[in-house]
Amino acid sequence: MMSLRLFGGRAAPAPPPRSAPVARERLQILLAHERGLRGQPDLLDLLRSEILAVVSRHVTIDPEKLNIRMERGSDVSMLEIDIEVPNVADRRSVAVA
Amino acid sequence: MAKVLVVTSGKGGVGKTTTTAALGATLAQMGEKVVVVDFDVGLRNLDLVLGAERRVVFDFINVVQGIANLSQALIRDKRLENLWLLPASQTRDKDALTEEGVGKIIAELRTKFDWIICDSPAGIERGAMLAMRFADEAVVVTNPEVSSVRDSDRIIGMLDSKTVKAEKGEQVQKHLLITRFDTARAARGEMLSIEDVLDILATPLLGIIPESQDVLRASNVGAPVTLNDADCPPSRAYIDAARRLMGETVPMMVPTARKGLMDRLLGRRAA
């Protein structure tokens, strides 16, 4: 490093810390998580169509207004189902009219 | 029996096209009849890397649409009589590529060639899916860098689930090719090591291609790196990788850092 200075180079910086071990660890954690999520869309699709079928038996809903989300935590996961139900009375009266 | 090999990665810029050209040329030199197929509709580059860009008349989609037949679209390499190119379409709509059309062309190529090497586009969209769809084997090209490794993991998952082989309950045989490997940086702990990448991706290693100016030099003049200079470090690594694809047992050479004066002074090679 002295030689660099002799040749007019910048002062030698302290060697950067080894970053590869950090990269390795971050990847291992991330990929374990992502591999767990794989195939997940299929499960959500299945849930979606079954929930839609059950709810539609009793209430008229717009299939577009059914949202399902799965959030994975380390201890528990959360399944969030959000269904927008239109005002049934209005819908019925329109249908009759 | 013909083998369909997809060269894929997820991430762009990792060396898929370089790899397709180098492996294709080397297999052809070994006496195999090889066609390299560019799947990157709209952004074709394999013709350029092979130095055949001015000879493209018809392309993949012309064949799918019945405007040309396969023999009209195939371009024979000027240096290697066993190497052929099927170029991608440059201008047309990406949706022109259908699974049915691709399946028909791959089936026809199987009757004419020993190796059908499919150069996948980056990403995980339609083009990449179709490039891997009919594969028997896959070369997953990875740089020792976090985003490339992550994308390769995703692609490996797709090879195991979205290919015709996977759907039949069989396995696409996967090979990992680590490219742009910079020994000096890996030794300093700045770059994921070969062991790290293998450990994370758990896929058999086909080869390690060192980062090198020779790759750029070869693409500048339109030649597969292995034809441009068969003795340079990346070429030797590609030739070994091709021999492994042919089933030979070739000891794995881990590229070693060069010990030139400039390298020692600068601490690294120019990227």
Image (cartoon, rainbow, N blue to C red):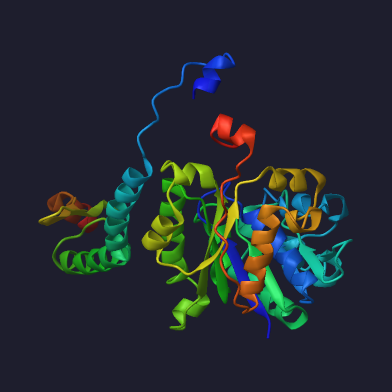
Nearest the viewer among B167 and A30 is: A30
Q: In the picture shown, does residue B25 fall above or below B100?
A: above
Q: Is residue B155 left or right of residue A41?
A: right
Nearest the viewer among B66 and A43 is: A43
Nearest the viewer among B259 and B243 is: B259
Nearest the viewer among A88 and B220 is: B220
Q: Is residue B52 left or right of residue B92?
A: right
Q: Is residue A51 left or right of residue B163?
A: left
Q: Position of residue B215 (x, y in %)?
A: 70, 48
- For the point 78% across and 76% down, the residue is B33
Quarter-wise, where is residue B259 in the image?
top right
Q: Position of residue B102 (x, y in %)?
A: 65, 70
Spot the residue most to the left. Answer: A75
| Residue B20 appears anywhere in the view | no
- For the point 54% across and 21% down, the residue is A4
Q: In the picture shown, does residue B66 fall above or below B268?
A: below
Q: Position of residue A3 (x, y in %)?
A: 54, 22
Spot the residue most to the bottom. Answer: B1
Q: Quadrant of the C terminus of chain A?
A: bottom left
| Residue B176 appears anywhere in the view | yes
Quarter-wise, where is residue B202 in the image?
bottom left
Q: Position of residue B66 (x, y in %)?
A: 77, 68
- For the point 41% across and 65% down, the residue is B157
Q: In the picture shown, does residue B103 fall above or below B130?
A: below
Q: How many marks?
A: 0
